[in-house]
Amino acid sequence: MNPRFWFVLGSLIAGLGVAAGAFGAHALRQRLPTELLAIFETGVRYQVYHALGLLAVALASDHWPSAGFNLAGWLFLVGILLFSGSLYALCLSGLRTLGAITPLGGLCLLLAWATLAWSVWQNRS
């Protein structure tokens, strides 16, 4: 994937995070218990934070060529989908078992940051 792909994807995911945050603040505030609303907000927060990680992947891969950046990008994407997506699904469906998926997303996000750092470290040009 080229840097433009990761930058556009990161921008879109960040924008969707803003939309999800507005949805939570306006449409869900009266419908969800405080505990579930806090979980939903955690999903939004992590979505936006890691969308910024995708922007970092785009900028780094444009500056230092490395296949590691693509791996980091895919790990960010899968991590966002699993982590934030499972929290959104848990809140909207009420199925607590969906929370079992969340740690897998968190692991992907941790690996994404580590892969991004390693890829930059290896390219000392």
Image: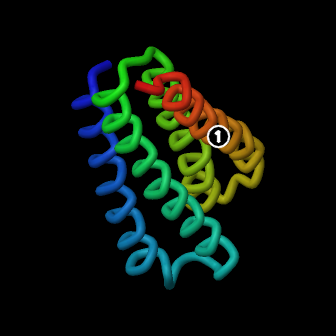
Q: Residue at x 43, y 79 (%)?
A: 25
| Amino acid type, mark 1 | Gly
The spot of residue 114 in percent (x, y) is 63, 35
Residue that mark 1 sits on: 105
Question: Would you place residue 23 above or below residue 5 in this image?
Answer: below
Q: What is the crowding at mark 1: few (fewer than 14 residues within 10 Å), some, or many (at least 20)?
A: many
Q: Nearer the viewer, residue 67 or 80?
A: 67
Q: Residue furthest front?
A: 125
The spot of residue 59 in percent (x, y) is 32, 38
Quadrant in which the N terminus is drawn: top left
Local SS, label 1: helix
Q: Is residue 18 left or right of residue 107?
A: left
Corner quadrant of residue 20: bottom left
Q: Residue at x 64, y 55 (%)?
A: 90
The spot of residue 38 in percent (x, y) is 62, 74
Q: Is residue 46 left or right of residue 99?
A: left
Q: Residue at x 54, y 23 (%)?
A: 122
The spot of residue 14 in percent (x, y) is 35, 54
Question: Would you place residue 17 above or below residue 108 in this image?
Answer: below
The colour scheme used to paint the residues is rainbow
Corner quadrant of residue 6: top left
Q: Is residue 51 left or right of residue 95?
A: left
Question: Would you place residue 65 above or below residue 3 in this image?
Answer: above
Q: Residue furthest top?
A: 67
Q: Nearer the viewer, residue 104 or 50?
A: 50
Q: Nearer the viewer, residue 92 or 65?
A: 65
Question: Would you place residue 73 above or below residue 8 in this image?
Answer: above
Q: Is residue 22 left or right of residue 84?
A: left
Q: Nearer the viewer, residue 11 or 40?
A: 11
